[in-house]
Image: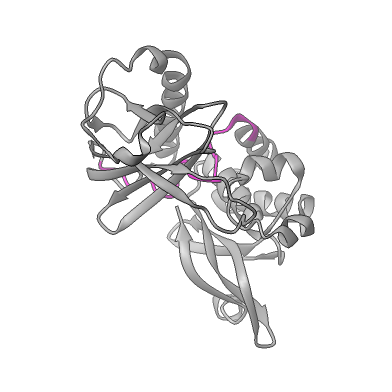
Amino acid sequence: MKDFRLFRRILIILTAIFLITVIAPAAYAGQADIRWFTPYTEGNSVTLSEGNSFDTWFSFQGTVTEKYTGIIVRAVLGNDEAYYYYPAVGNTVAGAVYLRFGEGSYRVDFNLVKPNNGNPGVIAYDSLARVQVENTDNADMRYLLPSWGIESNNRTITQKARQIVGQASDDYSKAKAIFDWVSKNLVYDMDKFRRGEFYDNDGAVTALQTKKGLCRDYANLVTAMCRAEGIEARTVLGEAGTGGTWYGHAWNEVRIGDRWVSMDAVWKVFDQDTGIFETTHKKTQEVY
């Protein structure tokens, strides 16, 4: 079952990459029924594949004016939501939106990202468009597919993850190898900390390439590499501290068999007894 799920996920990702880079540019003859927020459509646009029914994912292309730096996509199904950020290259934006929560009707919002204007801790945006799409796949893949800052389908990530896990044959050993590598090879980026750049536009790829980052960069890299190896993983947000002093922090939970294993690559803590771990870590949010 595990091998089948990994094979299916790899097939979805490879198909997405192929269609985005090879077929998609010629396939945008039509599009789903889009609701536009007209104050912001002057010079800005987004185009989807024809129709409004998809299997797990769909691609889009867009244009933005010099007022904006990219597009943030929000996909919502019931109480679940996920975000995807794609920076502009010149005045064009392209990417994939994963319908990660299984079968159903998703509301998808496309938002124009504004420059941070000296406040990198805040992401400001204008609403461009909204569309309703159907996902025909009933598989819940929220902890396996790529997401914002967790580029688990990026070749740099997949190749490094494969190298790190080596001959490890079980998920626990693979996750431990990834955790060990990240905790030993990344350094905490104090310059980024002082600038207050706490959101995750940089992502796992940048953390791997620069070998530095904040706690969320550490966590996103662990999540991305585990997902690249077909292991369900998530970045966890919350607070951490000792001696009564708490501060914002991020770490990981990885599904091994029927349990979620906690690990903190910054603190270098792996699969600690739950009762002990919870005395220093308070979880408030999970990141898909």
Which residue is nearer to you in this view: 67 or 178? 67
Residue 167 appears in the rendering: no
Question: Is residue 21 rendered to the left or right of residue 38?
Answer: right
Seen at 54% across and 38% down, the residue is 69
**Residue 7 point in image, percent of width and height:** 43, 32
Snapshot quadrant of residue 27: top left
Total number of numbered discs in the rendering? 0
In the rendered image, residue 169 lying in the magenta stretch gets the answer: no
In the rendered image, residue 150 lying in the magenta stretch gets the answer: yes
Q: Is residue 63 above or below residue 234?
A: above
Seen at 65% across and 32% down, the residue is 156
Seen at 30% across and 50% down, the residue is 76
Question: Is residue 288 rendered to the left or right of residue 133?
Answer: right
Work out which residue is located at the far top of the displayed protein and give it. Answer: 26
What secondary structure predominates along the stretch shown in magenta? loop
Residue 209 appears in the rendering: yes
**Residue 118 point in image, percent of width and height:** 65, 54
Q: Is residue 34 above or below residue 245?
A: above
- How does the figure colour the protein chain or chains? one colour
In the rendered structure, which segment of residues is drawn in magenta? Answer: 138-156
**Residue 23 point in image, percent of width and height:** 40, 14
Seen at 65% across and 56% down, the residue is 197
* The N terminus sits in image quarter: top left
Snapshot quadrant of residue 29: top left
